[in-house]
Amino acid sequence: STQSTWGKQVAEAIWHDATTQPLNMPVYVDVLLMLHKVQNVDDGILFAGHSIRRMVVERCQSEFYANPTDINRNDCGHANARLLAELYSRNVLPRRVGLEIVHWLLAPPAPYGPHCPDTLHRRLVLLCAFVTGAGPRLEEAGLDTELWTVLGRFRDTESPCRARFLVENLLVLRSNCWDSSKS
């Protein structure tokens, strides 16, 4: 139907703009939440019964779990992880989903062939992007010490500079009780 197609286009536009304009990401999440609230009041008439919030979350998840060997996805993946963190920190995603994302990123990367870029490095960058945005809620959800142990190891290894820098920033942010003004 026309409403369903229009809803998918709106969801895609919100996802696209939020991931390509990360400084405006909170605004796009605000728009998403307002549309979701209007949709609930309107009994789903706005998008032919399809949840706008669900459409955006599904788009985020499909992009997040995409093949990490696609070099063109790397920048999008980082912004997408930040969008998932923003959605998670605003209670759009259930607690278990945040913990599942962290555990998925901590798992050994799947083998994608001999010409695979450093998927471990990519997962570490995505993990830092997600945990930086979702940290306080993840801590409330009972994030285990495995994450902090793994991240501590990366701080002291021969990891690429970008990964070490992101890990160090994340560990400092956590030690400051998630207050970025103290860093």
Image (tube, helix red, strand yellow):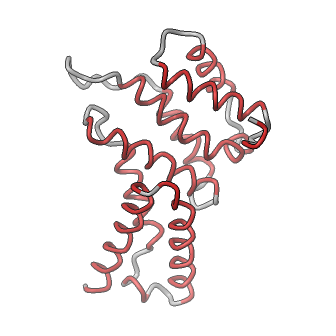
Q: Quadrant of the C terminus?
A: top right
How many numbered discs, if any? 0
Where, by quadrant of the figure, is residue 89 drawn?
Answer: bottom right
Q: Could you tell whether 81 is left or right of 176 in the image?
A: left
Point out residue 28 in the picture as x, y percentages from the top left corner: 50, 67
The one of 114 and 125 positioned closer to us in this rendering: 125
Residue located 41% across and 23% down the image: 120
The one of 110 and 130 positioned closer to us in this rendering: 130
Q: Could you tell whether 41 is left or right of 159 in the image?
A: right
Q: Quadrant of the N terminus?
A: bottom left
Point out residue 153 in the picture as x, y percentages from the top left corner: 59, 14
> Is 125 placed above or below 23 here?
above
Residue located 54% across and 82% down the image: 40
Point out residue 73 in the picture as x, y percentages from the top left corner: 30, 42
Where, by quadrant of the figure, is residue 108 drawn?
Answer: top left
Residue located 54% across and 9% down the image: 157
> Is 46 placed above or below 99 here?
below
Q: Could you tell whether 158 is left or right of 26 in the image?
A: left
Q: Could you tell whether 152 is left or right of 14 in the image?
A: right
> Is 176 placed above or below 2 here?
above
Residue located 39% across and 55% down the image: 20
